[in-house]
Image (tube, rainbow, N blue to C red):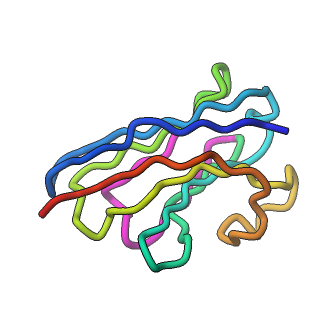
């Protein structure tokens, strides 16, 4: 089991920035793709961004150009830099570990993530 712990959430005004971090407890982090998802009240958990072990990234259309996902495999940390935040970005943000090291065609599928952190709340005031 890999323990994932998110941090960095908070309250910010629209147009502001936050940087989320996700610390993993084991070195398996450096092998598997990782993802950031978010869940707003009353809504399903949705994809924000993914990153492979080699650093290839993918973003939801709603955050492209504003959010940047990165990872530091040396210290088992995943990050999400969020700029120009909007009220619709308000949600609990979760990092997740993709369960396959080789198959990359399900990175946008929620069910292919087998471990999650506890989440960190991001609230954007307008």
From the viewer's perspective, is 4 left or right of 90? right
Reply above or below: 3 against 26: below
From the viewer's perspective, is 59 left or right of 26? left
Residue farthest toward the top in the current orientation of the protein = 74
Q: Is residue 59 magenta?
A: yes
Name the spot of residue 3 as percent of width and height, x first: 73, 36
Name the spot of residue 90 as percent of width and height, x first: 32, 62
Reply above or below: 32 against 38: above
Name the spot of residue 78 as percent of width and height, x first: 57, 37
Q: Nearer the viewer, residue 37 or 53?
A: 37
Question: For residue 27, which quarter of the picture?
Answer: top right
Q: Is residue 123 magenta?
A: no
Question: For residue 55, which quarter of the picture?
Answer: top right
Please name the residue shown 53% across and 39% down the image: 6
Number of numbered callouts drawn: 0
Query: Quadrant location of the C terminus?
Result: bottom left
Q: In the image, which residues are magenta?
A: 54-70
């Amino acid at each position: 089991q890999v323990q994932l712990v998110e941090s960095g959430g908070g309250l910010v005004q629209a147009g502001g920035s936050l940087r989320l971090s996700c610390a993993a407890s084991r070195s398996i982090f450096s092998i598997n793709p990782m993802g950031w998802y978010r869940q707003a009240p009353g809504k399903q958990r949705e994809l924000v961004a993914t990153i492979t072990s080699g650093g290839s990234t993918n973003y939801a259309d709603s955050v492209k150009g504003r959010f940047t996902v990165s990872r530091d495999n040396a210290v088992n940390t995943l990050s999400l830099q969020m700029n120009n935040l909007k009220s619709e970005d308000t949600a609990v943000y979760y990092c997740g570990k993709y369960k396959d090291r080789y198959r990359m065609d399900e990175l946008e599928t929620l069910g292919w993530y087998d471990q999650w952190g506890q989440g960190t709340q991001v609230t954007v005031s307008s």
